[in-house]
Image (cartoon, rainbow, N blue to C red):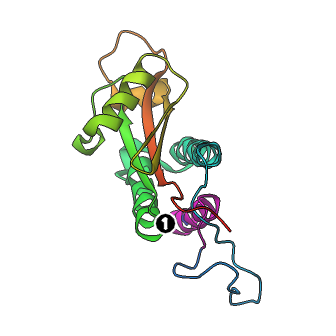
């Protein structure tokens, strides 16, 4: 059940990201049942990229919270939901050149891959740590967006087991996508 739920989430995210659930399909090409494809072009403006990134961020943030609540039990040895979503990230990268990356912000990284690296990730983590609601930048024809991922007291039992407060903390999600470099017809 968990795997099929992830596949459904993956398909929804690909459509929201401007992709098709059938990689390699071109715009206007029909789906197997005769419906036109949902594939759209890369974002043409920063405003369009920002809207797409905000939708992706909120979808993944909400999915992570629900998956943790409904499926994860620390004592059952299951894969943690953030790791399961990395499989979705990989598919989005391969099929649509979307890059998504978890960022450690207010707590030490539980996975060394979540430690911010590179200029954009370091700037994004710093902005989120300073309390900014989001971070955005454009660099080399890519749009970068980062938003906070809430770590509640339940999350902190693993993320920060030795703490003096149950106040929410934040991790982050960095999203980058190509911007269209040629004018649209």
Residue 14 placement, left or right of 120: right
- Segment colored magenta: 2-20
Query: Is residue 104 visible in this depiction of the protein?
Result: yes
Determine if the magenta segment contains residue 56: no
Residue hosting label 1: 96
- Quadrant location of the C terminus? bottom right
Q: Nearer the viewer, residue 39 or 181?
A: 181
Which percent across, then down, holds residue 53? 57, 46
Q: Quadrant of residue 31?
A: bottom right
Residue depicted at x 58% and y 44%: 46
Residue depicted at x 49% and y 20%: 168
Which percent across, then down, holds residue 66? 59, 45
Residue occupying the far right of the picture: 35
- Element carrying mark 1: helix
Please determine whether, in this image, residue 83 is positioned above or below residue 108.
below
Residue 26 placement, left or right of 111: right
- Quadrant location of the N terminus? bottom right
Query: Is residue 105 visible in this depiction of the protein?
Result: no
Which percent across, then down, holds residue 104? 34, 32
Q: Quadrant of residue 97?
A: bottom left
Residue 119 placement, left or right of 76: left
Q: Nearer the viewer, residue 28 or 106?
A: 28
Q: Dot 1: few (<14), some (14–19), or many (≥20) neighbours within 10 Å?
A: some
Residue occupying the far top of the picture: 164
Determine if the magenta segment contains residue 11: yes
């Amino acid at each position: 059940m968990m795997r099929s739920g992830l596949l459904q989430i993956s398909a929804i995210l690909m459509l929201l990201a401007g992709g098709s659930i059938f990689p390699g399909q071109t715009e206007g090409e029909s789906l197997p049942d005769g419906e036109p494809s949902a594939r759209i072009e890369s974002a043409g403006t920063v405003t369009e990229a920002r809207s797409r990134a905000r939708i992706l961020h909120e979808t993944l943030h909400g999915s992570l919270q629900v998956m943790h609540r409904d499926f994860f039990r620390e004592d059952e040895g299951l894969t943690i939901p953030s790791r399961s979503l990395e499989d979705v990230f990989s598919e989005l990268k391969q099929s649509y050149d979307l890059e998504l990356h978890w960022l450690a912000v207010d707590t030490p990284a539980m996975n060394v891959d979540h430690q911010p690296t590179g200029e954009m990730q370091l700037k994004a983590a710093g902005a989120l740590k300073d309390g900014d609601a989001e971070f955005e930048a454009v660099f080399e024809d890519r749009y970068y967006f980062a938003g906070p991922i809430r770590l509640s007291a339940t999350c902190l039992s693993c993320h920060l087991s030795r703490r003096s407060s149950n106040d929410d903390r934040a991790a982050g999600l960095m999203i980058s996508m190509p911007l269209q470099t040629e004018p649209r017809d």
